[in-house]
Image (cartoon, grey):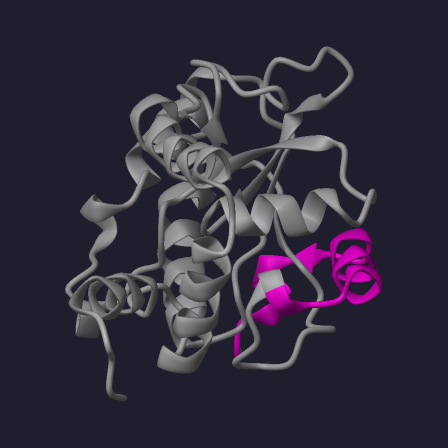
Amino acid sequence: MNFSSKLLEDAVNEFGKLPGIGQKTALRLVLHLLGKEQAEVAQFGNTLIKLKNEIKNCRVCHNISDYDICNICSAPKREKEVICVVEDARDVMAIENTNQYFGVYHVLGGLISPMDGIGPSDLTIEDLVERVKTSEVKEIILALSANMEGDTTLFYLHKKLKDFNIPITTIARGIAFGGELEYADEVTLGRSIATRVPYENTLIK
């Protein structure tokens, strides 16, 4: 793509680094911003800078939050004895949108993926183990994407948690293998949460 301006090219290249944004879409976004008033563009930029500088991770569950403890962990009506383990904040949002789950969460910050150099120590697994040790937990739901990395992480988590003698369940496979939670429709994801099954039942005997 030929650009008449180096400034325009640089801006397009930066937008093009975002996931799912090709060069044509990046150009359209940049041109849209160019057509806005200076104050609107400044507000856009300042919002991103403020987000980066002030966003926190909840001290309890590691979800993205404005505060040290997120509004889910601090909500008095949530079932604190049920912990749903997810990959990242996008999965928390997806499950919350189903209105089928009323427990709390634990955000791993990724999945075990040796090919990508991500091991158990790169995730918040030990924090989860410590949380189970020090809290009254009645159930752990492993709600991870139905892919190779998700299954590897499920197996590892089960090994780490099984000695606590707490029911460990996993979401029902209404989601096709290879699918990611954030892209599942709300009805399917909600049904998968509601009809969760013991993790042991999913293992090949």
**Residue at image coords 78%, 16%:** 77
**Residue at image coords 21%, 62%:** 7
Percent position (x, y) of residue 66?
48, 20
**Residue at image coords 57%, 76%:** 179
Is 36 located above or below residue 136 in the figure?
A: below
The residue stretch that appears in magenta: 183-204
The picture quadrant where one finds residue 117 is bottom left
Is 48 located above or below residue 135 in the figure?
A: below
Percent position (x, y) of residue 186?
79, 59
In the rendered image, residue 184 lying in the magenta stretch gets the answer yes
The picture quadrant where one finds residue 12 is bottom left
- The foreground one among 149 and 130 is 149
Q: How many marks?
A: 0
- The foreground one among 47 and 103 is 47
For the view shown, which residue lies furthest in the bottom direction? 1
In the rendered image, residue 64 lying in the magenta stretch gets the answer no
- What is the chief secondary structure element of the magenta stretch? helix
Percent position (x, y) of residue 58?
44, 23
